[in-house]
Image (cartoon, rainbow, N blue to C red):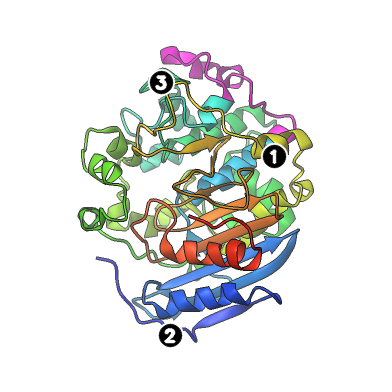
Amino acid sequence: MVLKVAVSPDMMGGDVDEGYGKVADAFRANLASGKEIGAAVAVYRDGVKVVDLWGGYRDGTAKAPWQADTMVNMFSTTKGVTAMAVAVAVSKGMLSYDAKVADYWPEFAQAGKGDVTLRQLLAHQAGLCALTPAPSLADIADPDRLAPILARQAPAWRPGTRHGYHAITLGWYQSELIRRADPAGRTVGRFLADEIAAPLGLDLHIGLPAEVDRGRVAHLHQWKRAESLLHLNVMPAGFALAALNPVGLAARATGVPSDVKPWDGDYNRDEVRAVEMPSSNGIGTARAVARLYGAAAAGGADLGLTDAVLDDLTSPASTPSGGIRDRVMNVKILYSLGFCKPVPMVQFGSSDKAFGTPGFGGSFGFADPDTGVGFGYVMNRLGFHLASDPRELALRQAVFRDVLGVRPQS
């Protein structure tokens, strides 16, 4: 059961620009509600930081306060970071969204995957949401061992006909594509560090380097898997029940690596933090996430994004022929180029040009080009909502509805 800790609303640091006071009010209310242990939120607008707040405890058991530079694992919010790295690689001419994956990685063509394009893969349409057999932590620590496992996998459906959340696997496919196309042979974590994080000064990592002070990393306060049955009112029942079937797609999609159990708190293990899991173990600050998306929302110049790539990111999703119900999560959702797009269940940003990714437990990062906003929220008390955790939603509503006066969020 997730630890419950009384957090004083006075345990809040940071600042907001004039006009953004309602965001600070919402963050303070979250701390006072008893639903947070530690959290941070940041907003950039037109490339300028306008919100930067943090509070509570980075470790609720030890009562260690969350600091300005505290980082935390953000689970699937990492997917958006990885997708942005791919967008940078496409902008550099290393990759093309419309090329076949096998053009860069010939071995990928096995098991009927020869015609799968990057665009289909990034839209979760390739049917590669699970791996059989599931690789171990040692396998994923060595890209030369992992690549053949990825290449051998047979699709769970005919690529392009359906989509289903590649909860853990997508980032490894993306990383191998970058490794194959990059003259330096870098993994996505190394590419992110060199091409994005260092130039922009971001506290953002996929594969936590040994030199990073572990005292800066927040402890995740995790709930047990069976507890999800007590929260079917907030977690889509179809997904929760599917995840409990050990041979079903939902459980298999989240069951990698084979020796890492998120329900047992394994994402707090340093050996898990240190390897690259580009769909699920990015570690960083809310400020870094908001800065990354803010750079894209402000036109992409700081990231080196081309106009063509930015147009691609803001365009409507290319939907699979079989409809938009996700085969893994049993919800209607839209994916495009490694990001999620707004749908009625999760209406984020001011228009459907917005793109980003929510993470397990409640985190969220996204870009809203029509307002020039980059948004980032991270926390260490994991919630039960599949997306739009009430803590995050309150902050997003404060930004978009209350401050900017655009469409309500959901």
Residue placed under numbered mark 1 in the picture: 88
Residue placed under numbered mark 2 in the picture: 8
Instruction: Say if the magenta span includes residue 380.
Output: no
Residue drawn at 63 percent across, 33 percent down = 185
Q: Amino acid at mark 3?
A: Arg
Q: Nearer the viewer, residue 268 or 345?
A: 345
Disc on res. 152: 3
Precedes in sequence: disc 2 or disc 3: 2
Instruction: Say if the magenta span includes residue 106.
Output: yes
Residue 191 in the figure: left or right of residue 347 = right
Q: Which residues are magenta?
A: 90-118
Label 3: element kind: helix
Q: How many marks?
A: 3
Of marks 1 and 3, the one in the foreground: 1
Residue 409, position as x, y percentages in the image = 52, 56
Q: Quick check: 169 above or below 393?
A: above
For the residues labelled 2 and 1, the Cα–Cα distance comes to 41 Å
Q: Amino acid at mark 2?
A: Ser
